[in-house]
Image (tube, rainbow, N blue to C red):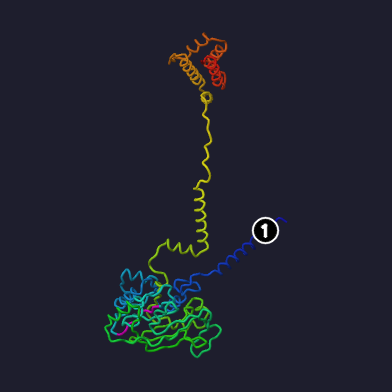
Amino acid sequence: MRLRTDLLIAGGVAAALLVVAYATGRRARGTDDPDRRASSFLVGREGTRAMADAAERLGVSVTRWRQRPQALVAWVERAAVDGADGPLTAAERRGAAGSVTSVSPVSPVSPVASTLATLAILEPSRSVTPAERLEVIGLTTRAVGADLVLAGGQSESVARCYGYLVVASFLDSARVAPPGVAGDSTSAFVHGHLVHAGETTTRRNRPAAARDERVAAEGECPDVTVVRTDTLLVTTSGKLAMLRLTVAPYQRSVVLIGDVSLVRNRTLRHSSTSPLVLDAVLPRSGRLVFDEYHQGFGTGGSMARVAIAWSAGHPVGWMVWQLLVVGLLALGAGAVRFGPVRAAIPRARRSSLEHVRALATALAAAQGHRVAIGALVRGLRRRLAVSTDRVAARDDWRPWLAGLAHHAPNTQVRDAAERLERLADHPESETAVLSAANAVEDVWHSLRP
């Protein structure tokens, strides 16, 4: 019976542990990263880490750029001269932090156009300034430059320079498919599409330096020429969802995506259109550069700022802030006095007799009977000398005590003095000092004025 009980208890504990483990694991699986930025650093459903992983598996070098686009342009030009993995400056190496694989060095740049990278700007959380836009578009029009991938409505400031705008639809969604192909049940949903904004800007007859200064100052688009447009994906209603532009004069590729959800992790994992999307955005050679600067992953910042940002968006951080506020309120309430000031508790001082008795008890405990009794008699002699205007002698107190017993004015004083002589010579017990203190008190009460 005892063995059966032990087995039942062990089985119940094991079942309880399994239930707790299942509940904890299910809760952990149900949580997801709340960060909705389309960053290649994020592995949640809203991130774009799957796109970077796919590029790595295909042998494409991945770089996460965390500086302004101006530094990227300088890095591309330097890489064209020194090789893709050639000697770079310290600032360029910090900007290229995040590169997970390397590619073989390329030959120095030739007079023909050289494409060393593909820059992906995916739904930036920070706005692209006119000066940065000028440098990004310049990558597609220079001899040494890069292809471009633009996705989402936040990248419209760059996409409109190629003649297209992004129209978002939050209340409606549509499936996408290649032109002329009916979408199936596993194709991706989009909440935005591209619309043509008219003809792109034509080249004007004025110096290029003056034109670039006016573009940077006024925020206008630089001059680009699109020579070819290929539609890659459309919605079920025929709206443009994804297309590829070919930009003159070096036949650079610019891929425009109306909704960034086409390249997010959750869509690339489950959508049937993922192979077509990856085939369009991943380069055949060179590097795939993710713009992480406009995602908020710049090289600047501090641990304190990150901790505060985390505490503002996490339940544990909310609890810490609440406890801090409660502690400050408790500290403030305890620091303020309410009501009148109360008087301190009076402490009565001990009398001289209490001090004498305490000293006598201590000396008795230390086996100092004769010393204690001698101190009591000298104190009595000093007090009587003051009361009778006689100076107390500093010699042996025994003759004085014998004279006091011989010339005692009454029987009580004589008996007390004789008792003191007897206790000083032969202590009776541990209470001898206490008895001597009582005898001194009797003499003092009898002889004091």
- In the image, 352: left or right of 254? right
In this rendering, the answer to whether 398 lies above or below 208 is above
Observer-nearest of 390 and 84: 390
Relative image position of residue 190 (x, y in whole percent)? 50, 81
Residue found at x 69% / y 60% = 8
Q: Main secondary structure of the magenta part?
A: strand
Circle 1 Cα neighbour tier, 10 Å, few/some/many (<14 / 14–19 / ≥20) = few
Q: In terms of secondary structure, where does tag 1 sit?
A: helix
Depth order, front residue of 391/66: 391
Residue 194, visible in the rendered structure: yes
Residue sitting farthest toward the front:
340
Tell me how many marks there are. 1
Determine whether 34 is above or below 223 in the image. above
Quick one: 350 or 57, which is closer to the camera?
350
Q: Which amino acid does label 1 sit on?
A: Ile
Quadrant in the rendering for residue 75: bottom left
Q: Which residue is drawn at 33% across and 69% down?
A: 91
The reply to whether residue 422 is visible in this rendering is no
Magenta span includes 82: no
Quarter of the image with the N terminus is bottom right
Q: Say which quarter of the image contains residue 165.
A: bottom left
Q: Where is residue 267 in the image (x, y as percent from the top left)?
A: 51, 78
* Position of 360 relative to 247 (above/below): above
- Chain part drawn in magenta: 112-119
In the image, residue 392 lies at what x, y percent?
44, 15
> Where residue 174 sits: x, y (%)?
53, 83
Q: Which residue is labeled 1 in the image?
A: 9
